[in-house]
Image (tube, rainbow, N blue to C red):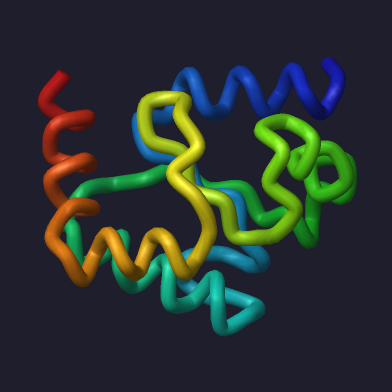
Amino acid sequence: MSALDRIKKQVTENTIMLYMKGTPEMPMCGFSSRTVEALKQCGKEFGYCNVILDQEVMRDLPSFKDWPTFPQLYIKGELIGGCDITLELFESGELKKLIDEAAAA
């Protein structure tokens, strides 16, 4: 299975999917760490892919939705954005609303 096929499968099978450097328990960059903390505060489980360990995904994900940086957050298959957008949505309360709606569907 190609990396793009794996990405499509992951964002389809996981209501909330985060592509990050490291793991939620051990993020390997500040942007990933802040994004994980915002997601944890929303109180729902999420899937993740450590792009450090999956170099094919790291190489191909930026072309999947034309977003060049990590982390990348997807909710119900749609790209939400990276760290800055995720934090803005979290601070406004919109992230929790998006996540709650997605989890309820």
Which quadrant holds the N terminus?
top right
Q: How far across and how far down the image is residue 51, in percent? A: 73, 54
**Rendered image quadrant of residue 26:** bottom right
Residue drawn where x is 37% and y is 26% of the image: 76
Q: Is residue 43 above or below residue 31?
A: above
Location of residue 16 (image quadrant) = top left
Q: Is 63 left or right of 103, judged from the image as shown? A: right
Q: Is residue 83 left or right of residue 2?
A: left
Q: Quadrant of the rendered structure where residue 60 is?
A: top right
**Which residue is the extreme one toward the bottom?**
30
Q: Residue at x 70, y 59 (%)?
A: 69
Q: Where is residue 102? Give x, y as percent.
A: 22, 29
In the displayed structure image, the side of residue 88 where residue 44 appears, left or right:
left
- The foreground one among 66 and 71 is 66
102 over 26 or under it: above or below:
above
Q: How many marks?
A: 0
In depth, the one of 34 and 84 nearer the eye is: 84
- The C terminus sits in image quarter: top left
Name the residue rendered at 65%, 78% in the picture: 28
Measuring from the top left, give residue 77's x and y in whole percent. 46, 25
**Residue at image location 75% in from the left, 40% down from the top:** 61
Judging depth in this view, the residue of 99 and 92 nearest the camera is: 92
